[in-house]
Image: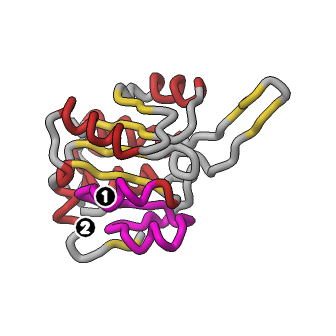
Amino acid sequence: MEYRADALVRAARIKLVVMDVDGTLTDGRIYIGPDGEAMKEFSVKDGMGISMLHTAGVATAIITGRKSTIVERRAAELKISHVWQGCQDKREAWMQMKDEMQLADRDIAYIGDDLNDLSLLMRAGLACCTADAQPEVKYVSHVISGCNGGNGAVRDIAELVLKSQGKWQTLVDAFAGTKLAPAYGQ
């Protein structure tokens, strides 16, 4: 993972992590059968990262350009209650989301991978991208995951946010059923 000098300070104040889908939560492949879109592949590691954010009190949302029942199902499984699909201009959803949740740009992290994510990355308090993101996206990002889209990039960034906020070790201890010593990765 690569990050700018101020990324950890930015991550410490994040209250909401917003994600793109294709190329971020998935590897960008879309499998289309004779009746339309058939499958997208999601990482369970990303799902665990999202669940850990929720447990720690960090909200999550999706803003995506495509519309898919598969995304609705995955979001429901992960209890992502703020989902905007079919957004040709993602800025409209961003502004609506900010108003509904009463947040400022600095409170929001955005994870994307492609040119249609630039406008939100440039607004976000913490701009993040996948390892296989477009060069222009990497250029404006505070954090570049060590993982490609659909292969743990969201988990990577979730861990960074949780560690920056001092919440990671408590979550690890809860999974272990005891306090681990020494604190790993802190």
Marks 2 and 1: in contact by CB < 8 Å? yes
Q: Which secondary structure lies at badge 1?
A: helix
In the image, residue 184 above or below residue 139: above
> At 56% from the left edge and 43% from the top edge, which residue is drawn?
43
Residue type at mark 2 is Ala
Q: Which quadrant is home to the N terminus?
A: bottom left
- In this rendered view, identify the residue nearer to me: 14 or 141: 141
For marks 1 and 2 on the same chain, the one whose residue lies earlier in the sequence: 2
* Mark 2 neighbour density, 10 Å: few (under 14) some (14–19) many (20 or more): many
Residue 81 at what x, y percent from top left? 35, 25
Quadrant location of residue 79?
A: top left
> At 45% from the left edge and 66% from the top edge, which residue is drawn?
137
Residue 145 at what x, y percent from top left? 44, 64
- In this rendered view, identify the residue nearer to me: 43 or 124: 124
* Mark 1 neighbour density, 10 Å: few (under 14) some (14–19) many (20 or more): many
Residue bounds of the magenta highlight: 117-146
Horizontal side of residue 20 vs 15, given as left or right: right
In space, the residues marked 1 and 2 are separated at their CA atoms by: 9 Å
Residue topped by disc 1: 160
Residue type at mark 1 is Leu
Residue topped by disc 2: 7
